[in-house]
């Protein structure tokens, strides 16, 4: 009998998405009749706008969309994404520089698969979204964490980035607004970081999926536009999921220099071929339309943002900086780890999150999933009443800690 492993080492090393795992557990408990409130998944609670749905219905009746289409995306969608990018961030690209992908996650994976050789290092600011490490690992890259905390608003300085740079560093991953912290770099900070990357010949992969979700005095700045010195060493990742409440439609894109896009398209031609044509036509309607739908959602998110930050900071032992973008709060719960609660003494934020799910029926994602133990991520992309009820339950339970 063969003693070889059944599963390859490469795939065995991949961790399950912690955010999706928490969301799945919460939904399973809810299906079993428990009144669980989930702060796990980063998913707008709004339906996809009607005009986008109608565009998909029309496309489904069109025979040409029943067939294979170009692996890199429908030409009309690539044109629209290029136009939308110039409109929203001022970054001018040609349609040939756009690759339409099966959601933002495929864009993330293909960017790193295309850029990295084994041993190449990627600077990643922690806390980070759970998918980045796995995509880098699958590509043979080495993740180098630049750890931040609540004292700096979860922002990394040029000095911290430079301290982490080595001869093997090839890519800087730049994410602003950030998942999971909601941190947003100012224009000045973005320019300083971009110029530093250009000076050292680094590639910049920038995830701009939350570009339209910024609040208060914060503003989104595309590093690709703000730092022309980067030239053709920028790859922009984006998609329709967060802006247009289209998480389930699975349409994202990668924008980059023509050689990178061609190579990534070759990969996609073998991995998945074209994205669903119906979903692509829905995305075309989304990016070609105005931003009134996202403006309404942003108003609701801003209201919830202020509520959740206030309520979290009222809980003894919880410290939550104000997020400036996206729809996440990332409070520190380090002061509560190790304290006794309901006859237990959770030794980590992961164990504390489990206790909260069991005792308060509230699902949060622990900081271990994002590279920084001692924190929780709570998505406030859920209804106002559920948000208040969920944080109230959590606060009532945590107030018992001693």
Image (cartoon, rainbow, N blue to C red):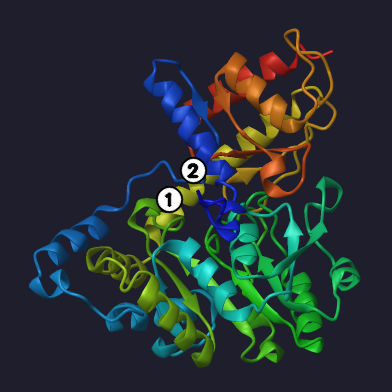
The x, y position of residue 382, in whole percent, is 48, 36
The x, y position of residue 91, in whole percent, is 54, 83
Under tag 1, what secondary structure? helix
Please state which of residues 390 and 112 is positioned toward the viewer in this rendering: 112
Residue occupying image coordinates x 37% and y 54%:
246
| Above or below for 29 versus 342 | below
| Above or below for 352 versus 204 | above
Please state which of residues 314 and 12 is positioned toward the viewer in this rendering: 12
Among the 4 quarters of the image, the one containing residue 114: bottom right
| Above or below for 295 versus 87 | above
Does 398 sit left or right of 114 as displayed? right
Tell me the number on the disc at residue 300.
Answer: 2
Extreme residue in the top direction: 343
Residue occupying image coordinates x 77% and y 40%:
373
Does the rendering let one see residue 121? yes
> Which residue, given by chain and number where applicable, does mark 1 sit on?
296
Please state which of residues 247 and 386 is positioned toward the viewer in this rendering: 247
The x, y position of residue 83, in whole percent, is 40, 82
Q: Tell whether label 2 touches label 1 (CB within 8 Å).
A: yes
Among the 4 quarters of the image, the one containing residue 339: top right
Crowding near the residue tagged with mark 2, few <14, some 14–19, many ≥20 C-alpha atoms within 10 Å: some
How far apart are labels 1 and 2 at the CA level?
A: 7 Å
Does 233 sit left or right of 127 as displayed? left
| Above or below for 237 versus 37 | below
Residue occupying image coordinates x 71% and y 26%:
351
Under tag 2, what secondary structure? helix
């Amino acid at each position: 009998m063969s003693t070889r492993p059944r599963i390859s080492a490469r795939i065995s090393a991949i961790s399950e998405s912690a955010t999706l795992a928490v969301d799945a557990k919460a939904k399973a408990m809810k299906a079993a009749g428990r009144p669980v409130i989930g702060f796990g998944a980063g998913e707008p609670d709004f339906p996809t706008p009607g005009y986008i749905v109608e565009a998909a219905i029309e496309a489904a009746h069109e025979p040409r969309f029943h067939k294979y289409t170009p692996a890199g995306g429908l030409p009309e969608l690539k044109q629209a994404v290029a136009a939308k990018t110039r409109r929203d961030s001022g970054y001018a690209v040609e349609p040939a520089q756009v690759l339409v992908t099966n959601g933002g996650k495929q864009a993330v994976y293909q960017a790193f698969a295309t850029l990295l050789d084994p041993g190449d290092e990627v600077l990643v600011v922690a806390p980070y979204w759970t998918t980045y490490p796995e995509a880098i690992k699958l590509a043979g890259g080495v993740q180098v964490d630049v750890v931040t905390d609540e004292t700096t608003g979860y922002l990394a300085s040029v000095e911290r980035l430079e301290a982490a740079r080595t001869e093997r560093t090839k890519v800087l991953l730049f994410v602003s607004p950030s998942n999971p912290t909601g941190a947003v770099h100012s224009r000045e900070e973005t320019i300083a970081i971009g110029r530093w990357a250009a000076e050292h010949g680094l590639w910049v992969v920038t995830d701009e999926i939350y570009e339209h979700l910024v609040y208060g005095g914060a503003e989104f700045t595309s590093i690709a536009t703000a730092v022309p010195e980067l030239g053709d060493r920028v790859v922009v990742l984006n998609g329709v999921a967060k802006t247009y409440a289209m998480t389930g439609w699975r349409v994202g894109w990668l924008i980059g220099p023509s050689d990178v896009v061609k190579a990534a398209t070759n990969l996609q031609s073998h991995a998945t071929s074209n994205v669903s044509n119906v979903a692509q036509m829905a995305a075309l309607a989304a990016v070609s339309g105005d931003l009134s739908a996202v403006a309404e959602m942003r108003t609701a998110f801003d209201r919830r943002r202020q509520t959740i930050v206030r309520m979290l900071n009222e809980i003894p032992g919880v410290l939550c900086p104000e997020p400036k973008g996206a729809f996440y709060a990332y409070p520190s719960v380090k002061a509560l780890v190790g304290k006794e609660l309901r006859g237990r003494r959770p030794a980590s934020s992961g164990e504390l999150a489990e206790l909260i799910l069991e005792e308060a029926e509230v699902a949060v994602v622990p900081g271990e999933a994002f590279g920084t133990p001692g924190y929780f991520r709570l998505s406030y992309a859920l209804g106002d009443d559920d948000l208040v009820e969920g944080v109230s339950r959590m606060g009532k339970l945590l107030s018992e800690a001693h």
